[in-house]
Amino acid sequence: MKSNKNIDDFCLLGEFFHSINKDTGNIEWQGIVIRRPEVGWYLIELFEWFTGTPNVRRLVRIEDMTEWLFYPNVEAMKFSYENGIARKGGRYRKEED
């Protein structure tokens, strides 16, 4: 079955995420994708770890996001961090974190 959706229409806008550090394999950032200023680039807003409030925005290439964990909403991101794939002691967060 052929999709009616153009590949350029697919983007990550509004997705929440945990970024994965390529060197350590650990979670590095948490935030939301807020804009796609140009194909292949995304503007993200990072959240503070303790308060969860937005603190900085960064431009990131799609190639640097391939290992990130994406979530449809903030509740799913929080659940993953506390109980799911992003939980302490799991693949992306060691016990000592």
Image: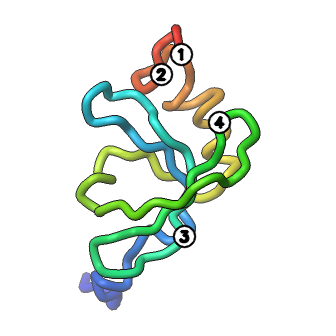
The residue under label 3 is which amino acid type?
Ile
Q: Which residue is mark 1?
A: 97
Compute the Cα span from label 4 to label 3. Answer: 18 Å
Question: Is residue 2 or residue 10 the one in the foreground?
Answer: 10
Label 2 close to label 1 by CB (< 8 Å): yes
In the rendered view, tell whether residue 63 sits above or below residue 91.
below
The residue under label 1 is which amino acid type?
Asp
Label 3 close to label 2 by CB (< 8 Å): no
Mark 1: secondary structure: loop
In the rendered view, tell whether residue 59 sits above or below residue 94.
below
* Image-quadrant location for residue 69: top left
**Outermost residue toward the top in this view:** 96
Label 4 close to label 1 by CB (< 8 Å): no
**Numbered circle sitting on residue 16:** none
12 sits to left or right of 24 = right
From the image, state whether disc 2 or disc 4 is nearer to you: 4
**Numbered circle sitting on residue 93:** 2
Compute the Cα span from label 3 to label 2. Answer: 25 Å
Going from N to C along the chain, the mark reached first, 4 or 3, is 3
Q: Which residue is mark 3?
A: 34
**Outermost residue toward the right in this view:** 51
Label 2 close to label 4 by CB (< 8 Å): no
Compute the Cα span from label 2 to label 4. Answer: 14 Å
**Label 4, residues with CA under 10 Å away: few <14, some 14-19, many ≥20:** few
Q: Which residue is mark 4?
A: 49
